[in-house]
Image: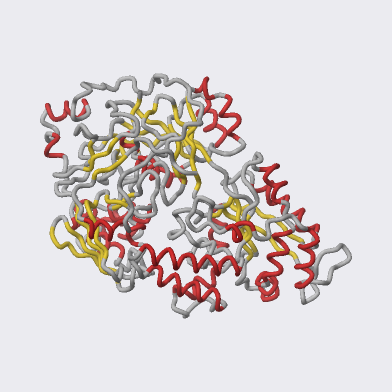
Amino acid sequence: MSPEPATHASHRAGALNRRRFLATTGGAAMAFTSLTGCDLLSTNPTNGSRDAGHDRGDSSAKEAPGLAKLVKAGKLPPLPERLPKSPLTVTPAERTGHYGGDLTSAILGPAEAVQLYRIVGYDYLMRWSPQWKSAPIPNIAKLAEASPDARRFTFELREGMRWSNGDPFTAHDIVFVQNDVFNNEELYPAGPSNPGTAQALDDHTVRFTFEDPNGLFLQEQASTMGLDYVTRPSRYLKQFHAKYNRDVAAEAKKEKFASWTEYFSAKADRWVNPDLPTVFPWRITQGVGEGTRVVLERNPYYWKVDPDGRQLPYIDRVVYSVVSDPEVLLTHVLAGDIDFQLRPTNTLTNKPVLARRREQGHYRFSRAVPSNMNTMVLCLNLTHGDRALRGIFANKDFRIGLSLAINRQEIIDTAYQKQGRPYQAAPRPESEFYDEKFATQYTEYDVAGANQHLDRVLPDKDGKGFRLRPDGRRLEFTVEFANGIWPEYPTVLELIRTYAAQVGVDLRIKGEDRALFDVRTGEAQKHDAAVWQGAGGWNDIYLNPYFYLPVSAGATYFGRAWWDWYVSGGKNGEEPPEPTKRQLTLFDRLKGTADATERTSLMKQILAIAREEFYAIGINLQPEEYATVNDRLRNVPDKMPNSWVYPTPGPTSPEQYFVN
């Protein structure tokens, strides 16, 4: 789905010579093209009541009226003293906006507070362009330089940039995070997988040095993995750290914390503690857990401006409702009470209902192109503790047979509103790594072919037609899934259970709480099989490749013991087969290069092995998704990528959204 060319949000990050720029971006252009689609029905914008009481002020004013009043009263420094010497300029998607109003959204319970990053928490050292080119671009960092061996990274920060309380944001803040937080054995007992240190070359230049090559470090700094470096202000947090406060253990006990580390973590909780300074466009004033709302107000020291030099953000406040029922949330969206919402209301089942009410609810759809490659990936535990099951699952013929037994088109018609197409756990068509053979192999519905492959593994059956294990017992296993995340999963798995039974496989299904699911499929390794959506389908492939090789502690459902072996240098877990070891060697080389061309070549080799090994079974190509956007909210693109790595809609710059 190629973006149409037109004006869109862009960022002017200051001077950057070509050599240093290429080291940062791999040569990706900084000019932003449009993601705006022209095939959506939009209703006329309407004025809501959520901007009542907010003074829009003079349209030519350089700062919000509320801040101007504080300056006049002597309670806030003048704007030039609050901006860095080189503020980042954001070109609005449609037009320059005006100040004022609230942006409303919702989260499904406190556990979903992680979703706040998407709108109000996307400002890291680097960032993705709105159209999500594969290389990151400067953001808080004016420029970045990587050494050829990908062990050393140097960032130049914006001189004069400040935290929301007015404290200077400097290289020393980042050094504190790396050296005193990540490298602190009490805060992080396991230690970093790739130990590193940070050094402040001066107040505005920081250098990271890692023991091993870290070729994905810049990409990580544009994703949520880079969050901690810019959300832990040293001047504030040192008072809760044992290195800087010898009395902190006693203070922690007085505040009812079991240890200073718990005390520190609570004070560093960016969505709970309103006293924690931030560099984001809005700062928390009512945190998660304080009631049925989370409220954020504009950051008076925010470091971005529009092309006219007017300080961003345009919007005064962001207000999240905290609800417990997705149906209640859907009702609020239908009524037009929500300005921007992705999950959990953006299901295929809800879309026809939402489409019919667009005019009455005064909202429109923004198309969201997913990075996920599959609506469901079925992973058999190839390192299962039951040796008989392990032998069966590890036999490729068994996996092929099970895949051929699945009627994917019926699943798509029944559970996915006829959206998508039969697809394996393979990169999406939009990806530079798309491989038609990988994407389509073993996706045809072929019961006879399924039986042929399964007969090679388990030829004997019991009196009811179910296949017998080598030990004479009936083959039966359970597929586990997390409740409440994807409502169609029980339907899909019930269909898969039926298809499996038709070829003599006794497959059970079990839904469980997300926390229990994570434990059983993670460190405990107690699952027979598990399902999850297929990440790593597009530009997230470098950071989320875990359906192609075992490189994730929490999501390598098909081979967690191989991951343990890999990260422990062979001390723990189980040694994987040779093709998998070859993949891990290639992945080490991939992480060890700063050269984008070499990285691409290495990933293609990794994927070629994944295609042949066929670790996981895909069901359906993830269809295009959508967000609902109230008509009064402007400068929101009509089309954007959708990914946690992206993370939607953060790179479209919500700070330049405004209420019409």
Task: Using the image, determine if residue 483 lies above or below residue 80.
Answer: below
Q: Nearer the viewer, residue 170 or 277?
A: 170
- Residue at the image position 50 percent from the left and 68 percent from the top: 606
335 with respect to 501 (left or right): left
- Residue at the image position 72 percent from the left and 46 percent from the top: 410
Task: Using the image, determine if residue 37 lies above or below residue 110.
Answer: above
**Is residue 255 in sight in this rendering?**
no
User: Total of numbered circles in the picture?
Assistant: 0
- Residue 196 image offset from top left, x and y in percent: 29, 69
Colour setting: secondary structure
Q: Nearer the viewer, residue 307 or 59?
A: 307
> Which residue lies most toward the bottom here?
571
127 with respect to 344 (left or right): left
> Which residue lies most toward the right here?
463
- Residue 340 image offset from top left, x and y in percent: 44, 33
Q: Nearer the viewer, residue 16 or 528?
A: 16
Q: Quadrant of the C terminus?
A: top left
Q: Nearer the viewer, residue 355 or 568?
A: 355
614 with respect to 211 (left or right): right
**Is residue 166 in sight in this rendering?**
yes
- Residue 316 image offset from top left, x and y in percent: 29, 30
Determine which quarter of the picture holds residue 385: bottom right
Task: Using the image, determine if residue 161 lies above or below residue 445.
Answer: above
Determine which quarter of the picture holds residue 450: bottom right
- Residue at the image position 51 percent from the left and 54 percent from the top: 537
- Residue 306 image offset from top left, x and y in percent: 24, 34
- Residue at the image position 50 percent from the left and 46 percent from the top: 370
Task: Using the image, determine if residue 626 lies above or below residue 333.
Answer: below
